[in-house]
Image (tube, grey):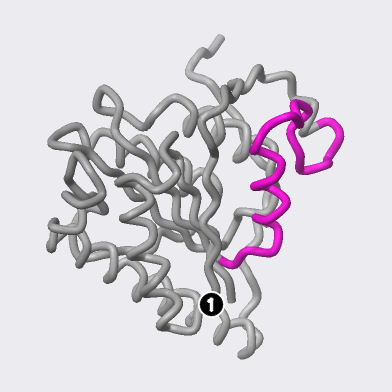
Amino acid sequence: MHVLLINGSPREKGCTYTALNEVAQTLQKEDIGTDIIHIGAEPIRGCTACVHCKQSGSGRCVYGNDIVNVILGKAETADGFIFGSPVYYAGANGAMISVMDRMFFAGNCFAHKPAGCVVSARRAGTTAALDQLNKYLPISGMPMAPSMYWNMVHGHTPEDVRQDEEGLQIMRVLGRNMAWLLRCIQAGKKAGIALPTLDEPRLRTNFIRD
């Protein structure tokens, strides 16, 4: 089994990476493979709602000159995901949101794979940013891996984060719970428990009525 961890910070080995690495090390101790992908510091365009990905059925974004399709390629074989972002103005940073908007809209390989989100801040804005990231998961049919508190670390530098003992403990518990959830899903498959399917037409309504 393998978990893909996405580092949404422009800093490759900064505070967000420090939190994700704590999760990754815990997963490795549970014999779960990991891969941390850094989205980089280059500009990443947002989704333009062109719907080409849906029309083509490719599971890829039509704008293929950045990290999004690289992540989607790896996501197809991943069993679980951890998404991490620094906090910018009480939200996830813009590049990470561009990645997630395009990745989740284009991708068709996320349903029924467990995931968790992690945020990092010097002081505040963490709960709002975490809430923002978490919203991508249930709409994509992904079980959310739990921890013992909200998944956040605090610190201005990686050294600060390494002193956030509670934050790092939260990351370790998240890693162990992710490993447990992956094993439960694996055991269910071996026992012949089929993944749930939508056995009725997909409904799309708005709130305007004649």
**Direction top: furthest residue:** 210
Element under disc 1: helix
Left or right of residue 14, residue 43 in this image:
right
Q: Position of residue 153 (x, y in %)?
A: 21, 50
In the rendered image of this protein, does residue 166 appear above or below residue 72?
Answer: below
Residue toward you, 1 or 131: 1
Which residue in the protein does label 1 denote? Answer: 185
**Direction bottom: furthest residue:** 191
User: How many discs appear?
Assistant: 1
Q: Position of residue 138 (x, y in %)?
A: 46, 48
**Residue beneath the point at 59% across and 25% down:** 44
Q: Residues within 10 Å of mark 1 (few under 14, many from 20)?
A: some
Q: Residue 98 occupies which quadrant of the picture?
A: top right
**Residue beneath the point at 13% across and 36% down:** 123
In the rendered image of this protein, does residue 172 appear above or below residue 140?
Answer: below
- Amino acid on which disc 1 is placed: Ile
Q: Position of residue 203 (x, y in %)?
A: 62, 36
Residue toward you, 166 or 115: 166
Q: Position of residue 187 (x, y in %)?
A: 55, 87
**Residue beneath the point at 77% across and 33% down:** 54
Instruction: Find out whether residue 59 is within the magenta segment.
Output: yes
Quarter of the image with the N terminus is bottom right
Quarter of the image with the C terminus is top right
In the rendered image of this protein, does residue 145 appear above or below residue 97?
Answer: below
Left or right of residue 129, residue 204 in this image:
right
Magenta segment, which residues? Answer: 55-79
Instruction: Find out whether residue 76 is within the magenta segment.
Output: yes
Q: Residue 87 occupies which quadrant of the picture?
A: top left
